[in-house]
Structures are given as structure tokens and as C-alpha cells.
Image (cartoon, helix red, strand yellow):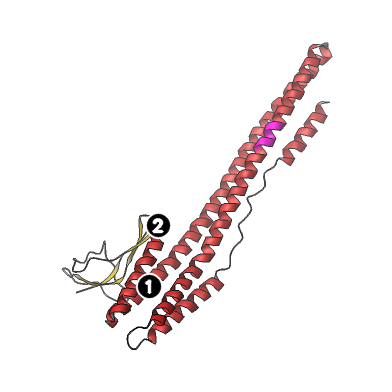
Amino acid sequence: MNKGSESKDAKSRKAAAPRALPLPVAVPKWPFLLADIIFIGLGYWISTLITGPAQQWHIISILVCAGLGAAFAVAPFYFEYRAGAKAVEIAQLTTVAKEVNKMETVAAQIAEATERWNAVQESSGQTAQLAEEIATGIAATVKEHHEFMAKAGTDEHATLKLEVEKLRRAEQDWAATLVGQLDLVYRLERSAAASGKEPFMQTMATFQSQCRDLAKRVGLVAFEAEPDAAFDAEHHGMLDNESKPVDGAKVTETRLPGIRLQGRLIRKPLVSAA
């Protein structure tokens, strides 16, 4: 009778063994990045066609190309993020369902033990010995259950840690792509300012402001250095092909804006100083 109970408990523990979290589907990024490059390149090519005052179709075409390029750059990371969040949600729901099943199993075991204890009270010495064996089996079952839960918790923690690391790497890739987009838009805005064409300058300034507002929604903030401010290596950076300015130099131009992600500085503004 005791051997049959241990066999049932072993089968119950085997059935309740946790499975690993489902891995989210990896979205191929190269088609989106290729489409992004094509649209940005097309926008840049259209801007080179502007020889006189910018026509309406020029401006609309550049804005459409830049918007589609940004959408294609962000799309694969958005899809991967949704797939990862869905996988974690499914895993959590599965864990809750398993815990409920375990509680039902424990309740059934308690009810069965109670019935056996009543039978023990009505029996003689042999029944008392049987009750002792049952108590020993329950103690062993509880010990194995605790060991099993401890191991399951460790495995689940390791799996969740791996998923978090994957999401962090995806966030870094996404941030690098979005920073590249903001840099490209900043260069286009500077080119428009250098052209001296007022409508084109206003359009690109508005477009850059809208792009930065969209980036702020996900915690990415671009900022420029103050002009004529004293150059400070702790707050300013230089391009790789430029040497560090002499002491007392002042900022003359922001080559590329500084970037903060969720309040954390990931790049100083790159400036030229004299």
C-alpha cells in the first residue's frame, strides 16, 4: 500500500515538472535595415535634386522617405519586444497554473491521509505500524517536494535572467539604430541650414523636432552643446579625426548631438572648438 502511494507521488511530480520558457521568435533584421537604407538613400538623392527653391513634392518625398526609413528601422525590434513579452507572460501563466495543480494534488494527498488515519484509529497494532510508515512516506514526499521546488525556482530564475539579457541586447541594438537615424536627420537639418533656403530649413527643423519628440517617448533624448561655451572634456567630445583643442577653446559648432537613454548618458555631444 505504501509502495503504491510513493509510485503515485512520483508520477504526480513527474507530470508537474516545469518546462523551459518558450523562446521568442527571432525577427530577421536585415530586410528592415535594407529597406531603411533604401528609403533614407532615396530621400538623400531627392534632396540632391533640389537646385532652386524646394518644391512641395521634394519636401513631401523627403519626409515620406525619412518616415518610412525610421519605421522600418524600429519595426523588427518592436516585433521582437512584443514576442519576448508574450513569451514571459505565457510562462508566468503556466507557472501559476502548475502551482494551482500542485495545491490540488496536495489537498488530495491530505484528504487521502486523513482517511487512512481514521482507519488506523480503528485498527490494532498492525494499523499503528502502518500509520507510522505512512507518516514516514509523507515526510519523504514533503522533503522531495521542497527540494523539487527549490530546483525549479533556480532553473526558472536562470531562464528569466537569460531572457532579460536578451531583451537588454535587443534594447542596445534598437538604441544604436535609432541614434543613427537621429544623427542622419541632424546632418540633413544642418545641410538644409547651410543651403540658406528658408522653406527647406524650416521644413527640416520641424521634421527633426518631430523625430526627437518620437524618440523621447521611448526615453531617447538628443541634445546639443551650448554655442560659445568653454570646451570641457567631461561634457564634450570630438570626432575621431580631430585632435583635442587647446585650453580655453570655445565650442563653435555641434557636429553630432549628445544622447541620453532613460536619463543615462550614452554619448557626449561631438563638437568643434577653436
Residue that appears at 42% across and 81% down: 57
Which quarter shows the N terminus? top right
Q: From mark 2 to mark 1, how far is it between C-alphas?
A: 18 Å
* Element under disc 1: helix
User: From this viewpoint, is residue 154 visible?
Assistant: yes
Q: Residue furthest bottom?
A: 51
- Would you call the spot at circle 1 few (<14 residues within 10 Å), some (14-19), or many (20 or more)? many
Instruction: Let me know if residue 100 is in the magenta part.
Output: yes
Q: Position of residue 258 (x, y in %)?
A: 32, 65
Which quarter shows the C terminus? bottom left
Q: Which quadrant holds residue 26?
A: bottom right
Q: Position of residue 50 (x, y in %)?
A: 36, 86
Residue that appears at 30% across and 66% down: 269
Instruction: Let me know if residue 165 is in the magenta part.
Output: no
Q: Which mark is residue 136?
A: none
Compared with 267, 145 (above or below) is above
Q: Identify residue type, mark 2.
A: Gly
Residue topped by disc 2: 219
Q: Identify residue type, mark 1.
A: Val
Q: Earlier in the sequence, mark 2 or mark 1?
A: 1
Residue topped by disc 1: 185
Residue that appears at 23% across and 65% down: 226
- Would you call the spot at circle 2 few (<14 residues within 10 Å), some (14-19), or many (20 or more)? some
In the image, 75: left or right of 146?
left
Compared with 69, 172 (above or below) is above
Q: Position of residue 70 (x, y in %)?
A: 46, 69
Q: Position of residue 224 (x, y in %)?
A: 28, 66
